[in-house]
Amino acid sequence: MTNIALVVLDTLRKDAFDKHFDWLPGKRFERAYSTANWTVPAHASLFTGLYSSEVGVHAKNMYFDADEPAIAEQLREQGYETRAFSANTNVSGHFDFDRGFTQFDAPEKMEHLNDDNQFDWRNYNRNADDTGAKKYLKALYACIQDDSATIPSLVTGINLLRYGGNPTEYGGSLEALEWLEETQFGDREFLFLNLMEAHEPYRVPSEYQTVEEPDLTGSVGDISIDEVDASQTKQAYDDCATYLSDIYKEIFDLLSSKFDYVITVADHGELLGEHDSWGHEYGIYPQLTHVPLVISGDDLSGSDAGAVSILDVHRTIQTLAGIEGESRGRNLLEDLSEGSFLTEYHGLTSWSEKKLEENGYGDDVERYNDDLSGYVAPQDYYGYETQSGVQVTGTNQDPDVSEKIQRLCEELDIRDVEKNNDVPDEIKDRLEDLGYA
């Protein structure tokens, strides 16, 4: 039996990983790329082995409603106990990312998103026409009339009005560590973790804080809603990476004693002033798509400089678990043939559009909603589309990048989806705290 843990260090840049995670054992993949610039489409790829455009889960449809099976569903069918702990609001039961998990937990203040015994806030929020206090008053009445656990549901409804702020102590790792220590794992386990320490608002314990906590960057692409203190923001991000490295050491040591393989990866990176931009709400720049990836276990070591994708993580998990299934990825633990991959951007989220409109940049929404694609080459280069044309980075640049991007895009079986990216008020509170809304 093979126990497998998949750990996503949300928003961790490759250069920050290289600086702070030299202690992490395993086989390193130096040219690993995400399929997307932010959480939802990247996790859709991790969970299905397909591009986000193919499963229709991205900025315009945030709900994991794809017809294709999720990796947790495949593993559960093969007798795996499938558990998850996610500190990311966007990777929660509300958005259906709990598919296939026998246990899907979150920090306490987010747990209502996953609790099936409580009033169905998920369905209510999707269908409610009212907003604010009026919406919750109607919901509290509905709780009383519903067959769900009334008291816990009422408590949750009241707390949704109260919480607003950060539902994790720093980024979820402390809560995840406590959860792991309390969980009894067996001999056929799949575990998924999402940890948010490297994400805005860049909070760390006082002993790690070398600069004052910066204001949220409030940026969309190269439009900064407020002035950004570049040096302070960069240092605060580095403080977060330092703290994440230390807390993850404790988590990794615990996982290593219970799991045969631990796969550590980031879903995307972060812009820290490059391209006059901050955050990760726009584009497929290399600072966003080039991610850390390490597989630990079974005396794995060394590094691989070939081009790989987070799609390969999906296939690798299938192979380790002995599962047959569809995937665009390859097994990372076998000799890899040269491969090329896409990166994708599918427009702005609803909160980014609103942010631009409310701050007088409504005319820019349309141009930021243009799809973009990138090409991860077998050779050492990456070509990617921007509003000003194709840019190429790396040592072996190719003048025919646009043709290669077009060729790979033509191979996609794209799922057309209706726009479904509005989020309820209590999730908007969390998004605001993370610098999105």
Image (tube, rainbow, N blue to C red):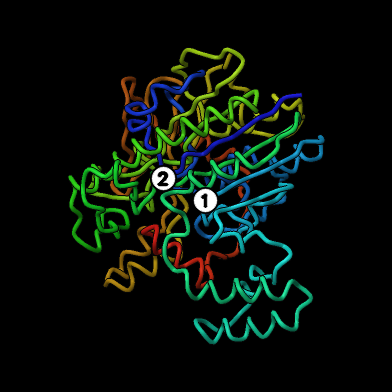
The amino acid pointed to by label 2 is: Glu
Q: Which mark is residue 337?
A: none
Q: Residues within 10 Å of mark 2 (few under 14, many from 20)?
A: many
Tag 1: residue type? Ala
Relative to 45, is 389 on the left or the right?
left
**Front residue of 169 and 322:** 169
Direction from residue 90 to residue 394 in the image, left or right: left
Q: Quadrant of the N terminus?
A: top right
Q: Is residue 286 above or below residue 436?
A: above
Secondary element at image label 2: loop
Figure quadrant of residue 292: top left
User: Residue 12: x, y in percent?
Assistant: 40, 39
Residue at horizontal 63%, vertical 81%? 139
The percent position of residue 317, horizontal first and vertical second, equals 66, 29
- Work out whether residue 89 can be spotted: yes
Q: Residues within 10 Å of mark 1 (few under 14, many from 20)?
A: many
Q: Which residue is mark 2?
A: 197
- Indicate the position of residue 182 as horizontal and vertical percent values: 64, 42
What residue sits right under mark 1 in the picture? 87
Name the residue at 52% across, 57% down: 89
Residue in the image at 70% along x and 30% along y: 318
Q: Earlier in the sequence, mark 1 or mark 2?
A: 1
Residue 241 x, y percent position in the rendering = 35, 37
Q: Disc 1 on helix, strand or loop?
A: loop
